[in-house]
Amino acid sequence: MASHGPLRVGYVPEHFSTPIHFAKKHYGLEAELIPFPSGTGHMITALRGGEIDVGIGLTEGWVAGLGRSQESGDRDGGFKLVGTYVETPLCWAISTGADRPEIKSVDSLQGGKIGVSRIGSGSYVMGYVLADERGWLIPSAGAGTAAEQASPYSDFVVLDTFEKLRKAVNSGEADFFMWEHFTSKRYYDNGEIRKVGEIYTPWSSWKIVASTRLIDGEKLDPRVDDLLGKLNLGIRHFNENKEEAIKYISTELDYSEEDARQWLETVRFPERSQGVDLNVIHNTVRVLCQAGVLSVGKGADAAAMVAKRR
């Protein structure tokens, strides 16, 4: 387990990243912060390819990626869960094009074309969670995975970025997509896209993972421990300096001051980012099996997804 040079940390450059910015600005976080606007699915590829060392992303994306690796016989998976970044659920807004009168409600989306950032990303996984909640999943005989089910959608259109997703629902390339509510809201307000519904994650929404190259048995590379400690300071600064957070979000990121203030009322970061509640991961695995993203009894092991600590 090598320990040299700054960690390469992948993150999503949205409002949730504000405590990471504060950890770097105010508390000397020595890490190379690498933005992934296309989200968690892209970070999984980067972790497995050795392009980043740590990822801060969506719970469902990490768990789906690890669960599918386990089901294929790869118990390593390339990374493990080491920390918790956001304790509250995520509100996924369901969006279509501004001028798509044929799409009147969420029920209009069954059998349609769903836009996703990547296969395996949060936007992909939540498509199945939505279909499960709506009763759109029709298992084939012996079905256990999404691949073995009759798909609730006619196509998964991979579009990488939020901007491309917005363009696709207006051009007709996709019928709808799902993205975080406040990130989407500015584009409802300016008339570019239209909201047809929303869905909340049934789990706390953001987790921190580290490459298995940084994990030796029950020991983490000390740089990961330092990162988690600095994130705690960044989170505390965020909680104690809300006006600074609002100014950063509304000037450096793609949000209005009003939306930044509203978002602050909905989000809760942990006092300690170290560690993961295994019950949350068990519940995520259970829901993803129910939705057909993972297979019941085919090897998805929640406990093995979490790095053990002394």
Image (cartoon, rainbow, N blue to C red):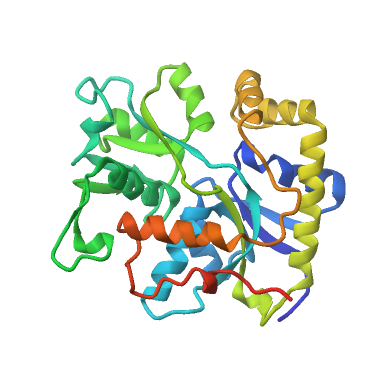
For residue 67, above or below residue 197: below
Question: Where does the image place residue 189, in percent across and percent down from the top left?
Answer: 47, 17
Would residue 49 be visible to someone looking at this image?
Answer: no
- Quadrant in the rendering for residue 309: bottom right
Report whether residue 138 is seen: yes
Direction right: furthest residue: 27
Where does the image place residue 109, in percent across and percent down from the top left?
24, 35
Question: In front here: 67 or 87?
Answer: 87
Q: Is residue 112 left or right of residue 133?
A: left
Residue found at x 69% / y 79%: 218
- Residue at left offset 41%, top offset 46%: 123
The N terminus lies in which quarter of the figure?
bottom right
Of all residues shown, which one is farthest toward the left?
Answer: 141
Q: Is residue 50 above or below residue 56?
A: below
Q: Nearer the viewer, residue 192 or 277?
A: 277
- Answer left or right for 202 relative to 197: right
Quarter of the rendering occupied by the C terminus: bottom right
Rendered location of residue 299, percent (x, y): 39, 75
| Drawn side of residue 133 relative to residue 138, left or right | right
- In the displayed orientation, state which residue is furthest to the front: 279
Say which quarter of the image contains residue 83: bottom right
Image point 36% across, 56% down: which residue? 119
Count of labels in the image: 0
In the rendered view, does 276 fall on the left or right side of 203?
right
